[in-house]
Image: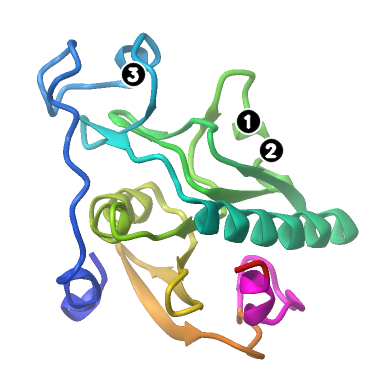
């Protein structure tokens, strides 16, 4: 939760991702990575605070935006030799009882040992989530809290309808928002300093 209740103000009109109570396994609140990895059901899932969630299938605009952002981040980290970029579906075990699939995430060179064959174990340095009416509350509440507790330094929340990116920086146990960015604005990223792409370029495929 961000300071001052800003998170709830951002999501009060959006729908909620429902816990996957129909999946056989531990009771909700007790799921861990090994239980999650053993699921035979089709679909995308996450575990936050031991609660299993099923993620809705993303729409075409969501995927277009993910593709654009990934391409720019991939190019930047390659040119600067600063780290690795990955995108969903790929498991990130933030901590015990927290397994997520960020839309996009960056791991800097100094943390590449967190990448294993099956999953990433530990916090990425930068996480990007493209919010939708079906996932926004989950992205801005449960997952935001999980990212903060795991120590993810920087979190971008992308709004496809408004064509904006909100940049959050971790300060202590909470995220502080630097504001909403759109159009010709450059994101003042701390993890990727001097990232040279105008925000509006992320939405050109819409």
174 displayed left or right of 11? right
Which residue is rendered at x = 46% and y = 57% of the image? 129
Q: Nearer the viewer, mark 3 or mark 2?
A: 3
64 displayed left or right of 155? right
Give the residue number, with chain letter if any, for mark 2: 112
- C-alpha distance separating marks 1 and 2: 6 Å
Q: Magenta stretch? A: 189-204
Q: Earlier in the sequence, mark 1 or mark 3?
A: 3
Which residue is rendered at x = 74% and y = 47% of the image? 109
In terms of image quadrants, where is residue 71? bottom right
89 displayed left or right of 186? left
Give the residue number, with chain letter if any, for mark 3: 36
The relative height of residue 49 versus residue 179 in the rendered view (above or below) is above
Which secondary structure type mostly characterizes the magenta part of the structure? loop
Which residue is rendered at x = 46% and y = 38% of the image? 101
Local secondary structure at mark 2 = helix
- As drawn, the label of residue 115 is 1
- C-alpha distance separating marks 3 and 2: 24 Å
Disc 3 to disc 2: CB gap under 8 Å:
no
- C-alpha distance separating marks 1 and 3: 18 Å
In terms of image quadrants, where is residue 170? bottom left
Counting from the top left corner in percent of width and height, residue 205 is at: 66, 67
Counting from the top left corner in percent of width and height, residue 189 is at: 61, 74
């Amino acid at each position: 939760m961000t300071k001052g209740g800003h998170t709830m103000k951002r999501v009060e009109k959006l729908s909620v991702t429902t816990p996957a109570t129909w999946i056989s396994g531990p009771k909700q609140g007790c799921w861990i990575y090994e239980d999650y990895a053993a699921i035979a059901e089709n679909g995308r899932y996450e575990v936050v605070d031991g609660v299993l969630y099923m993620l809705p299938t993303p729409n075409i605009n969501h995927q277009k935006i993910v593709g654009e952002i990934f391409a720019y981040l991939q190019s930047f980290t390659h040119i600067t030799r600063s780290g690795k970029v990955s995108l969903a579906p790929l498991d990130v075990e933030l901590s015990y009882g927290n397994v997520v699939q960020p839309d996009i995430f960056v791991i800097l060179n100094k943390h590449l040992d967190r990448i294993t064959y099956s999953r990433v174990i530990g916090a990425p340095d930068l996480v990007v989530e493209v919010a939708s009416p079906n996932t926004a509350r989950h992205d801005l509440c449960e997952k935001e809290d999980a990212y903060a507790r795991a120590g993810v330094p920087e979190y971008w929340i992308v709004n496809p309808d408004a064509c904006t990116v909100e940049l959050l920086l971790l300060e202590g146990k909470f995220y502080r928002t630097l504001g909403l960015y759109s159009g010709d604005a450059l994101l003042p990223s701390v993890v990727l300093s001097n990232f040279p792409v105008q925000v509006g370029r992320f939405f050109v495929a819409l």
